[in-house]
Amino acid sequence: MSSRRDSITLELPNRAENIATARRAVADFAAEAGADHRAVELAVSEAVTNAIVHGYPNEGEGRVVVDAHLKADTLIVRVRDDGCGIRPNPGGRGLGIGLALIGRLSSGIKIEDHDEGGTVVTMRFELSGGQ
Amino acid sequence: MADRRDGEPVGDDGGLSPGEAGAAARANVISDEVRGVAVAGLEGEVDLSNVEIVERRLAETLFGERAGSVLDLSEIRFLDSSALRMLLNLGAMADEEGRKLHLVVAEGSFAAHVLEVTRFQDMLAIHPTVERAIDSLD
């Protein structure tokens, strides 16, 4: 009998090539849990991209921590950086719609400053939306 | 009949990716010419890590002396908002050349999902097949 994982955690250097690693891992976890893995994959990619682009605008070294766990009928995904926090970045390489897109894909999003510095983005996904 | 010229993986690990093999997003650009129209097929994944090199390669493939430009996204496995920005950039390049960029997006594909969620489908010329896209140029 296979057992379902209750949580996963990834700690990754703040490099763009790690965005794919993070989103694939969480998407696999979401699929196992019965969440809409395509929505989760895209939302995690946007959140990790934001962490790298906005948390470290000067491309200094840092890390991004992604954890996902199940709580009742909800998948909760947190993306935390230890950078300078979310702030306007007019020279950014995205469309500037990352957070709005996460809001549309998830059932809830919360953005907080972390006590030890950096930003935490918490996203919620209902498991009933699984494929 | 399609004149498949090449599939062009570019990058350190054989794909349009700057990162380590098996981890970073990888993409391939497949260049075709159909009825005198430049058709680029994009496969794999596009995100912040490889979007610049993918955009450059697509621009080389799509724009030039041929009659029109069609970008087939049916086989793309993943794209994010940085890839959407790339599509807008390519559309702007097409406009500058006095042409229009036509996208092929298969129903139910990941690209269709992203374009629907972002409501970009109303901003771009989208067709269900390459043939339909080319017919629209006639």
Image (cartoon, helix red, strand yellow):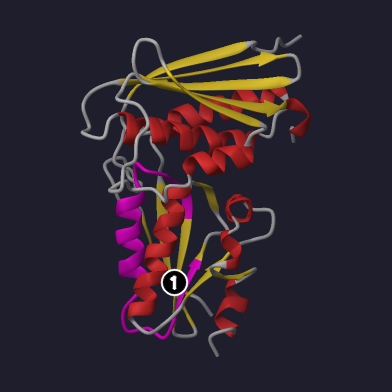
Q: Position of residue B69 (x, y in %)?
A: 44, 76
Name which quarter of the figure residue B49 lies in. Answer: top left
Q: Residue at x 53, y 60 (%)?
A: B73
**Chain ID, mark 1:** B
Is B11 placed above or below B37 here?
above
Q: Is residue B87 magenta?
A: no
Q: Is residue B101 visible?
A: yes
Q: Which residue is mark 1?
A: B32
**Residue at 69 percent of width and 34 percent of height:** A36
- SS assignment at label 1: strand
Relative to B138, residue B79 above or below: above
Of residues B43 and B95, the one nearer the viewer is: B95
Q: Position of residue B10 (x, y in %)?
A: 30, 51
Where B138 sits versus B122, above or below?
below
Q: Residue at x 52, y 21 (%)?
A: A78
Query: In terms of image quadrants, where is residue A31?
Result: top right
Q: Looking at the figure, which quarter contains the N terminus of chain A?
A: top right
Work out which residue is located at the far bottom of the displayed protein and give it: B138
Left or right of residue A4: residue B25:
left
Total numbered badges shown on the rendered structure: 1
- Indicate yes or no whether the magenta region holds residue B48: yes
Query: Which part of the image, by quadrant, shows the C terminus of chain A?
Result: top right
Residue B45: % across, % down: 46, 46
Which residues are the magenta region? Answer: B43-71
Nearer to us in this view, A27 or A51:
A51
- Decide if residue B23 is in sight here: no
What amino acid is found at the position of numbered circle 1 in the picture?
Asp
Front residue (pair A86, A51)? A86
Q: Is residue B58 left or right of residue A79?
A: left
- Report x, y in % for residue B39: 46, 72
Q: Residue at x 41, y 15 (%)?
A: A114
